[in-house]
Image (tube, rainbow, N blue to C red):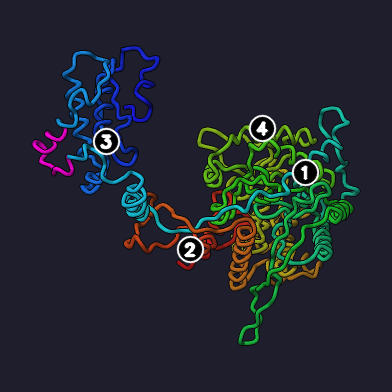
Amino acid sequence: HWWHAHHDELYDGMDGEGISQVFVSQGLYMDINNMMPGAEVYTHVSNLARHKWQPRGIVVGCFELGMQFWWDRGVVGRLLAAAMAASDAGNQTQAGKKIYPQDYDFDDRYKTYCKDNLHLSDDYCGLLGVPPVDANKWRSGPWRQLRFTKWKDMVCNRLTEPGEEFQLIGRNPAKDTIQTDAMINFWDHFGGEEVGAINLHNSKLERALEGRFGQHSVPKTGIILDLTHDYMGEKDPIRMERIREIIDIMAKLGFNLLQLRVMDDYYFQLEMPSHRNLATTQNQRMKQRKQQPNGENDERLYRDKHDVTPMSYNNLKTVVDYARQHGIEVMPEISVTSRAGGWIHAGFNVPCPNYMCGYGVDLKVELQDPAFLGVLSSVVYELRDVFSSDYFHLGYAHDAANVGCFEEAGGVPDIDEFEQKLEHLMQLQGVPPENIVRWEYPAADDNKKAKVAGSTVHTLNLQEPSKGSFVTTGLNFEDPENELEDAWAIYDHVKGISGVEPAAVLAWVGSLGTGIWDRMLIKERLLAVALALSKSQEDYGTREDFEPVYTEACKQFQWNCDALGNIPEVKSKLLAQELTDDIEAQLDDVCSSRTKKYSTRLPRRGILVPGERSQDQNAVEPSVTTADAKKHATEEPNEAKNSPDAGAAKRKEAEEE
């Protein structure tokens, strides 16, 4: 069905076969496209009908149903001219001969047929098919009002509803600088060497200090600290002093590995000499106690906004050196494939602002950006130069079920291909697959396991601990609702973990703040872990045998021993709410600093998208609002739902329901 090209062009280069299957409407749109009077319509249709290939059909486009339109645009009069041309052409024997209206007394025949057969007025028939209303006038007047205003508004209101969406704030101007700095840094160190793995440092500790309970039964034991969730709200010198105190505690308990998260979905909390523009400053809130009317202090913390600066590279080196002196190695954790919003300053995050502000977790990196691996290589090089562990933690792998961010941006890239390149990059940096640690991840489907760089899995919630794995399962001590309710439960749990011969057992601590450590009884719980891992301690099979030993050891450190590692229920609920508030604050910080909000139209629920249809189509609440974003702050996809970073909002909602 040809409608646009000139009819001579339609048949150019075509043979006779198949031409009879053509329908033609070229030049015969009666709405706004032309001002052809009846005589021109007659000529045009005659020449189409008598073309040497003879199309099967000639179709006139009238489109509109309205009677006023048919009169104003002369549709009736021009249809008469088209019918006359088709009739005359059918009676001709000389195919291909041009037809001219004057040759067939068009004017007189037209008027006669118009009046006698169609019974139209003399005035209308006298127009000879000329539209009474000019096309431009019709286009700018009633037609526009009907087509572009009323009709469009009715369709829009029926199928959509008002809402708000988020838009990323422009391309980060630092991206070019970051890429250039990364390339210079990499080639300054690597350019003069032969191609092969880079060995940067000697990870051997100065001395392997044993804790008060002797050596542990698992090769690597320790804790995980998270600089990106620095609830202390303190400047670097105070933070440094606090980390030294934590290292002292680790040494007393015989731990030998500190996992330090420096980048995640929210921030990149480390200033690196060659990548200063990567670091992000977070808006945290200073701790204050609120006094109740009865004079008692509320344990919940209220904070005013306050900038928390990233840790400096020199201070990090000081921390690593201090840990080395105490027999503790420090392993970095950064996010690469998933939960990687910290790359925002580098300009590599996938543009999914609505997903970012609605969920705030599991943000992705543009894995197809050819510059990303180069920048990542330089960052890994510099991190390897300061951290002391042979292990390197690359955060979360991609979950095939969580593609919301990719889908908003237009499609899911080849994750397996990127992970293969990532593994090669790490080998180039001197980190073999067995030393690459990744948080647990689900398989892409039931029959295929996703390709993931590295072979050491760090279990948390989804997978059971196994031989050679890193294990944090059940050891999230920052979670006020941890199922291991006291020291004995922790001891018994860790005993079971050690029996599968893992490569490491690490307790999630997260925050550096002394307030959280004291109220969550972090030290006292870590003591239970140390007792379970100690080779010099006998196995205690019952609570009655364990608790006296635990209490005696706890008193030697002058810690809070009476609670036996059990957090009161009231305090637990307050801490859960506080953690939820902190996560919502981080979401607001990330969303407000990286996006702007604008009004738009969204698919109407119950018609274009699933959901309950609104009764009043003209009064519909937005689909995505700031309130929705806060509500979804802890509705995290799959592996993120129960991660140490996640709050307790979902559990709190369930309790309230």
Q: Main secondary structure of the magenta part?
A: helix
How crowded pointer 4 is (Cα within 10 Å; few <14, some 14-19, many 20+) is rated as: some
How crowded pointer 3 is (Cα within 10 Å; few <14, some 14-19, many 20+) is rated as: some
Does the image show residue 209? Answer: no
Q: Give the label, 1 or 2, closer to the camera.
A: 1
In depth, the one of 215 and 197 nearer the eye is 197
Residue under pointer 4: 420
Instruction: Tell me the CA gap for discs 1 and 2.
Output: 42 Å
Q: Quadrant of residue 338?
A: top right
Q: Earlier in the sequence, mark 1 or mark 2?
A: 1
Q: Earlier in the sequence, mark 1 or mark 3?
A: 3
How crowded pointer 1 is (Cα within 10 Å; few <14, some 14-19, many 20+) is rated as: many
Instruction: Tell me the CA gap for discs 2 and 3.
Output: 73 Å
Residue under pointer 2: 654
Instruction: Tell me the CA gap for discs 4 and 2.
Output: 41 Å
Secondary-structure class at tag 4: helix
Residue under pointer 1: 379
Instruction: Tell me the CA gap for discs 4 and 1.
Output: 18 Å
Give the residue drawn at x 61%, y 45%.
350
Asked if residue 536 lies left or right of residue 53, the reply is right
Q: Which mark is residue 37?
A: 3
Give the residue drawn at x 62%, y 83%.
292
Task: Check if residue 157 falls in the magenta segment.
Answer: no
